[in-house]
Image (cartoon, helix red, strand yellow):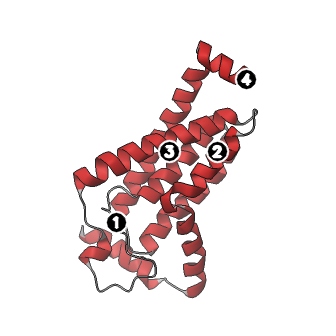
Amino acid sequence: MAWEFVVLDWFQSIQNPVLTSILKFVTMLGEAGWFWILLGVLLLCSRKYRPCGVAVLLALLLDLVLANIILKPLVARPRPCWVRDTVEMLVRVPKDYSFPSGHTMASFAAAGALYFTKRTWGCWAMVLAFFMGISRLYFYVHFPTDVLAGLFLGLLCGYLGALFMKKAGNTKFGKLYKEG
């Protein structure tokens, strides 16, 4: 865990008002996954992009269950700002556990679902997801391994969301859904 504090302390050393403002905006997009949920719902509204919306929302549902219902309570890892409570916090201190990073995992779940259904959009979403993970380190609310786990587990949820959407699209129900 010592190397993780070295990484977090480096992020503390580069803090400045401009970067803080940008990353506060990025991290705000990940609060409760609202940005990704809204994106999924908007995609559902278009017949052309409905499969992308279904994949995104399925990935986010898988993410919710895996991260918030199973892993966070099971692992019960304290946040770095709880361990080093003398660090000046630039965002409110989260009350739930640290592992995995929910912001990062939800972002990569949605970005992954987009990537596996609409590559170009997925690539842009991956960039936002990457900065989401960085913001969680910058604000001292997650360890690097929390963010890495969020990245990999999020991509897994994104892949499964896209896979489930594609499998459902090949069923009788899926064909009726596409026609309707």
- Which numbered disc covers residue 60? 3
Seen at 41% across and 53% down, the residue is 150
* Distance between the alpha carbons at the discs numbered 1 and 2: 31 Å
First of labels 3, 4 by sequence position: 3
First of labels 1, 3 by sequence position: 3
Dot 3: element: helix
Q: Mark 4 belongs to which amino acid?
A: Gly
Numbered disc in front, either 1 or 2: 2
Horizontal side of 68 relative to 128 (left or right) equals left
Dot 4: element: loop
Which of these two is toward me, 16 or 37? Answer: 37
- For disc 3, the neighbor class at 10 Å (few under 14, some 14 to 19, many from 20) is many
Q: Name the residue under label 4.
A: 180
Q: Mark 3 belongs to which amino acid?
A: Leu
| On screen, residue 66 above or below 77 | above
* Distance between the alpha carbons at the discs numbered 3 and 4: 24 Å
- Which numbered disc covers residue 41? 2
- Which numbered disc covers residue 143? 1
Q: Mark 2 belongs to which amino acid?
A: Val
Seen at 42% across and 81% down, the residue is 12
Residue 50 seen? yes
- Residue 118 in the image, given as x and y percentages of width and height: 67, 38
